[in-house]
Image (tube, grey):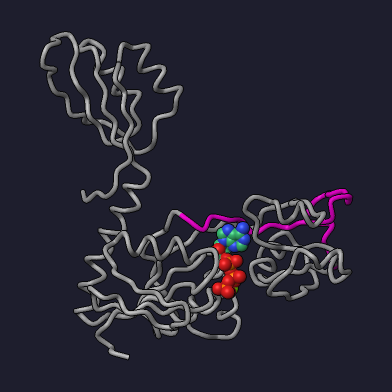
Amino acid sequence: MDSKRLRIAMQKSGRLSQDSQELLKSCGFKINLREDRLIAHVENMPIDILRVRDDDIPGLVMDKVVDLGIVGENVLEETMLERQSQGLATAFKKLKDLDYGGCRLSLAIPREQEWTGVAALQGKKIATTYPHLLKRFLAEQGVTFKPVLLTGSVEVAPRAGLADAICDLVSSGATLEANGLKEVQVIYRSKATLIQADTELYPEKQKLVDRLLPRLEGMLQARESKYIMLHAPKDKLAEITALLPGAENPTVMPLASDTTHVAMHVVATETLFWETMEKLKALGASSILVLPIEKMMM
Ligand code: ATP
Ligand code: MG
């Protein structure tokens, strides 16, 4: 592999793949991802995308085999604890928290059982893919347990008689529900994150990272921002501005044939809820438009 090309590891196929690909594409990457390829070349930049299992990504970054990686914080933190216990390198730099891959690592028990608190798990068998995160959490509560290590189908463990409880990732809770389990305690909240190897990059690579980061930040910021346009009575400008999220400095322009009203344009840090739009209207605002923003650079 050409050492001058920036190497980014991301999940080959799974819950983070689609969003990660779209994010990189929106940052201007032209990627031709062929299903069977381990490495994909970015056509218009000196970047290689390494497509691996998500479990391998933190290690690749910590071993400095790749320069950047996109991975869930749950996997990152678990790998860190595991490598610490093995005396392996665990250093990395966090570049940016991303806005997808949200989930929580939770304890769940059979639905019909009464939950009296984590103390009741003392000495119990708990099936999980995340033994280190679970151990850290329960140790803080003074609870010891017997880990049953499973890398898949964790939710069937209690029914199969393999464990008394499970500790698994949850987003909607539908999988737990379908397996007769109930979520009783969140132990870790996670999102996808972009990390970098803890080493000095070649200047060419560093320049590329320095260019990519503002694009990424711009994309993430654009996704959570809205462009808001409205007509406002001149005497209500302050009250109207106060209702717009994160808009200290609206652009105010005269209207062609109405001297009592002005046009206001603002970039708001979040969307406008119907309730806020109704309040704006009650203050005399009209023609209220909320538009998505595709890209931004501040
Ligand atoms: P791989 O084959 O890459 O090892 P996997 O089966 O371990 O894949 P996925 O199920 O694709 O992993 O999940 C990848 C990551 O997506 C998780 O580690 C977590 O950070 C995030 N995620 C978001 N929502 C959920 C969810 N409901 N269940 C599991 N993971 C979720
Ligand atoms: Mg995995």
Residue occupying image coordinates x 24% and y 85% = 4
Residue 193: x percent and y percent? 44, 63
Q: Nearer the viewer, residue 191 or 14?
A: 14
Q: Quadrant of the N terminus?
A: bottom left
Residue 142: x percent and y percent? 75, 62
One can see residue 2 in this view: yes
Residue occupying image coordinates x 68% and y 74% = 151
- Left or right, residue 130 beside residue 98: right
**In the image, farthest residue toward the bottom:** 1
Residue occupying image coordinates x 56% and y 79% = 84
- Count of numbered tags: 0
Residue occupying image coordinates x 29% and y 20% = 287
Residue 32: x percent and y percent? 35, 74
Q: Nearer the viewer, residue 46 or 96?
A: 46
Q: Nearer the viewer, residue 149 or 281?
A: 281
Residue 17: x percent and y percent? 48, 67
Magenta residues? 100-123
Figure quadrant of residue 122: bottom right
Q: Is residue 229 above or below residue 104?
A: above
Magenta region includes residue 110: yes
Q: Is residue 69 above or below residue 169?
A: below
One can see residue 78 in this view: no
Q: Quadrant of ligand 1?
A: bottom right
- Left or right, residue 111 beside residue 35: right
Q: Nearer the viewer, residue 287 or 80?
A: 287
Magenta region includes residue 163: no
